[in-house]
Image: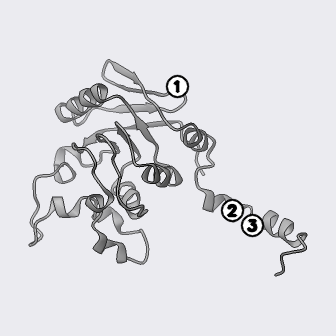
Amino acid sequence: MPKITIIKGTGIVIRGNDIDTDRIIPARYMKEVTFAGMGKYPFFDERFDENGNRKAHPFNDERFQGASILVVNKNFGCGSSREHAPQALMRWGIKTIVGESFAEIFAGNCTMMGVPTITLPKEEIDELMDFIEENPNHEIVVDLTNNEISYAEDKATFSMKGSSRKALMEGTWDSTRLLLEAREEIESVAGKLPYLTF
């Protein structure tokens, strides 16, 4: 797994508090067997009408295509604990989410996918959102080592859950892969335990 310390990219803004996982990805798209095609579905019902016609939405806006840093407001990712929501955002191209606050399970799911969720005060979020909307092609840099986000001449110190930051920086964020890579060692230890049989 890669160690994640610096993320660079352009930004995209979704305004509004309490954006839940059903808005991020409607439940009917959770029927897919794998996550592979989830990148088509973020905010689907807000991006398309019932006839499939595109509506005005940042994820449909040509200015923000290729953006990898999503900036949001308060309590983003609330609602159900569906992993499909961060999967859909990641597969659309999002590598980092910056917000006022996040639902805890959503943030944990993001970490397990190598997508940092970092927080800034509302005033700084508002400034960053305004900047992105006025400068959609400008690069933003998120530095986990120094807890800093920078763009143009501005720089801000962000907050992040310590255990998530450590896992991302050490490259130990994918617990499933860690278990698979340690399979032989796990089986060796399990084989010595008298209460386990294979």
Q: For the point 36% across and 49% down, which residue is it? A: 94
Mark 3 element type? helix
| 85 lies left or right of 138 | right
Q: Which residue is mark 3?
A: 183
Q: In the displayed image of the protein, which residue is found farthest to the bottom?
A: 198
Q: Position of residue 64 (x, y in %)?
A: 22, 45
Disc 2 element: helix
Mark 1, Cα crowd under 10 Å, few <14 / some 14-19 / many 20+, is few
The residue where tag 1 is placed is 146
Query: Few, some or many C-alpha atoms within 10 Å of disc 3 (few <14, some 14-19, many ≥20)?
Result: few
> Could you tell me how far apart the alpha carbons at marks 2 and 3 are, in whole angstroms?
6 Å
Residue 46, compared with residue 102, is above or below; it is: below
Q: Is residue 132 above or below residue 34?
A: above
Query: Could you tell me the amino acid type at mark 1?
Result: Asn
Q: Provide the secondary structure element on which disc 1 rests.
A: loop
Residue farthest along the top direction in this orientation? 153
Q: Which residue is pictured at 62% across the width and 57% down the height?
A: 175
User: In front: 132, or 83?
Assistant: 83
Circles 2 and 3: CB atoms closer than 8 Å: yes
Where does residue 130 sit, x and y in percent of width and height? 20, 30
Where on the picture, by quarter, is residue 141?
Answer: top left
Nearer to us in this view, 142 or 193 = 193
Which quarter of the picture shows residue 85? Answer: bottom left
- Spatial separation of the CA atoms under disc 2 and disc 1: 30 Å
Q: Are marks 3 and 1 in contact (CB under 8 Å)?
A: no
Looking at the picture, which amino acid does disc 2 mark? Leu
Q: Residue at x 35, y 58 (%)?
A: 79
What residue does disc 2 label? 179
Q: Earlier in the sequence, mark 3 or mark 1?
A: 1
Identify residue type, mark 3: Arg
Q: Are marks 2 and 1 in contact (CB under 8 Å)?
A: no
Image coordinates for residue 48, horizontal then vertical, percent: 14, 64
